[in-house]
Image: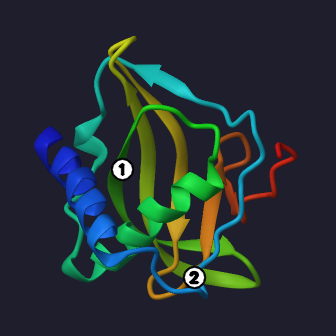
Amino acid sequence: MKTIVISAALAAAVLAAMTGCGSAEKQPQKAVGGQQTTAAAELPTEDFSRLPEDGEESLNYLSDAIDVTFPDVKGRKMYGFKGVEKVAAGNAEQECYIFDFYTYLTKTDEYTKIATVAQVPDTAELYVLDEQTGKYSEPQPSNVG
């Protein structure tokens, strides 16, 4: 299962490099700094599912959007697909692909969970889970330059 997550991350990086920057319509916002993170020696691969074939575009968009949404994150970026879920976000409940976003630092040999992110398929809508409230919201613009 670990290889699926790593393979998905590598495939997303290769596809992102081959497809360029994507649509001009998709412009994610930066998230507020100080996101709560959790470090671990291993990824919880048992929590991840296989990405559906039609979810590849959402993963590609997410991999591009992460750099803008979380500009201060360092390390190798990895994504774990958790499934499809109805999310109360925006003005209505929407069906979203749910991803856990992690980074890996070789210096510390640790995976750090940065956020759980919901992405509405075929749109630029991206929502971040507030772990304390259990609610999804749009990333807030960062106060950092």
Q: Residue at x 58, y 30 (%)?
A: 37
Up/down of 141 relative to 76, above or below? below
Q: Residues within 10 Å of mark 1 (few under 14, many from 20)?
A: many
Q: Nearer the viewer, residue 74 or 83?
A: 74
| Residue positioned 72% across, 65% down in the render | 138
Q: Residue at x 63, y 81 (%)?
A: 93
Q: Is residue 38 left or right of residue 44?
A: right
Residue type at tag 2: Gln
Of 63 and 81, the residue lying toward us: 63
* Left or right: 67, with 47 as reference point: right
| Rendered location of residue 106, percent (x, y) | 33, 19
Mark identifier at residue 1: none
Please determine whether, in this image, residue 39 is positioned above or below residue 90: above
Q: Which residue is mark 2?
A: 94
Q: Quadrant of residue 76?
A: top left
Q: Position of residue 18 (x, y in %)?
A: 27, 72
Q: Is residue 108 above or below residue 44?
A: above
Q: How is the image coloured?
A: rainbow
Q: Which residue is mark 1?
A: 79
119 left or right of 135? Answer: left
Asked which secondary structure carries label 1, the reply is strand
Residue at position x 73%, y 78% from top? 90
Q: Nearer the viewer, mark 2 or mark 1?
A: 1
Residue at the right extreme of this rendering: 143
Task: Please rate how many residues cluster around mark 2, counting C-alpha atoms within 10 Å: few if below 14, some from 14 to 19, many from 20.
Answer: some
Q: Looking at the picture, does residue 95 appear above or below residue 29?
A: below
Which quadrant of the view contains residue 92? bottom right
Which amino acid lies under the numbered mark 1 shown in the image of this protein? Tyr
Q: Nearer the viewer, residue 135 or 107?
A: 107
Is 136 placed left or right of 112 in the picture? right
The local secondary structure at tag 2 comes to strand
Q: Quadrant of the N terminus?
A: top left
